[in-house]
């Protein structure tokens, strides 16, 4: 049984980056978390390619990928939201009890719990070979990291506006629900590069480039909202075409 191969090494790099993101986060180096998340995303994107390229996809690789994703795309975004909530309570003199602040911030880890549920569901759901049902955990993580970047860099003066407990809780609940939902989401999987069969993906990429060029960090969470919106519109159009 081969444990060490290129695909598994990439998956372990994903896991290591997620672990280091947690370490830096709780040592007040939140500025390094986005960089480590990017490493996790790249490693996660290419481990599947590596398995197919080396013609060595294995059940162990599939399970290892999910275990790594629970940390990098489950624990990391949950911990980010926990830290943001904790900081918000810490800045409020009414909440003088550390224990109380921990308890009130703990719901942030709903993202972690629902990410684990989503990954377990994905592993046994044969309907998700070409597209996704529900928001993929990397997409949820990109939203949270984008939200963190907007907060840290005060993009367009939004930090004070978005750094509200109600908004943080709403984000946690919405992302958790979306991950286990049955909403069809398109995947970046190309069987060909023809425009006709990839219109949704190409349009999303074009809009993404425009948003990133104009809004920079503020564009990142908007891209995930755009991704969800485009996916829903595409699913509705597809359903209508099948019924006519």
Image (cartoon, helix red, strand yellow):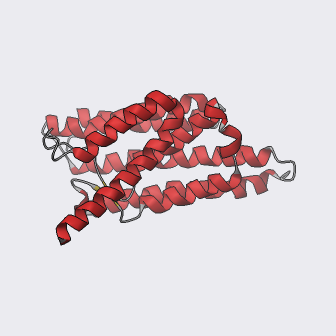
Q: Nearer the viewer, residue 182 or 11?
A: 182
Which quadrant of the figure contains the C terminus? bottom left
| Residue 8 appears in the figure | no
Residue 114 horizontal/vertical position (percent): 47, 59
In percent of the image, x 25 and y 36: which residue is there? 7
In this rendering, the answer to whether 4 lies above or below 76 is: above
Q: Nearer the viewer, residue 68 or 198?
A: 198
Residue 187 image position (x, y, % from top left): 28, 48
- Decide if residue 148 is on the left or right side of residue 206: right
The outermost residue toward the bottom is 243
Q: Quadrant of residue 26?
A: top right
Q: In the image, is 68 to the left or to the right of 94?
A: left
Q: In this picture, is 113 found above or below 80? A: below
- Percent of width and height locating residue 205: 32, 37
Q: Quadrant of the N terminus?
A: top left
Could one spot residue 234 in this view of the protein?
A: yes
Q: Would residue 70 be found to the left or right of residue 184 on screen?
A: right
Vertical position of residue 135 compared to residue 149: above or below = below
Residue 44 vertical placement versus 225 (above, below): above
Q: Residue at x 26, y 61 (%)?
A: 237
Q: Residue at x 30, y 63 (%)?
A: 236
Residue 146 percent location from the top left of the image: 52, 38
């Amino acid at each position: 049984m081969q444990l060490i191969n290129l695909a598994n090494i990439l998956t372990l790099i994903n896991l290591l980056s997620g672990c280091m993101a947690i370490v830096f986060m709780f040592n007040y180096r939140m500025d390094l978390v986005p960089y480590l998340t990017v490493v996790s995303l790249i490693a996660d994107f290419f481990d599947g390619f590596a398995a197919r390229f080396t013609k060595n996809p294995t059940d162990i690789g599939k399970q290892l990928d999910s275990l790594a994703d629970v940390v990098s795309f489950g624990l990391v975004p949950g911990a980010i939201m926990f830290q943001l909530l904790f900081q918000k309570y810490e800045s409020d003199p009414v909440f003088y009890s550390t224990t109380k602040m921990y308890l009130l911030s703990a719901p942030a880890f709903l993202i972690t719990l629902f990410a684990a549920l989503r990954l377990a569901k994905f592993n046994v759901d044969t309907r998700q070979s070409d597209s996704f049902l529900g928001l993929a955990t990397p997409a949820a993580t990109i939203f949270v990291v984008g939200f963190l970047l907007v907060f840290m860099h005060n993009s367009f003066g939004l930090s004070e506006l978005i750094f509200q407990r109600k908004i943080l809780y709403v984000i946690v609940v919405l992302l958790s629900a979306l991950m286990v939902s049955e909403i069809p989401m398109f995947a970046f999987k190309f069987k060909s590069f023809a425009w006709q069969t990839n219109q949704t993906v190409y349009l999303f990429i074009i809009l993404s480039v425009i948003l990133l060029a104009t809004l920079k960090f503020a564009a990142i969470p908007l891209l995930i909202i755009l991704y969800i919106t485009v996916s829903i519109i595409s699913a509705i159009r597809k359903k209508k075409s099948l019924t006519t």
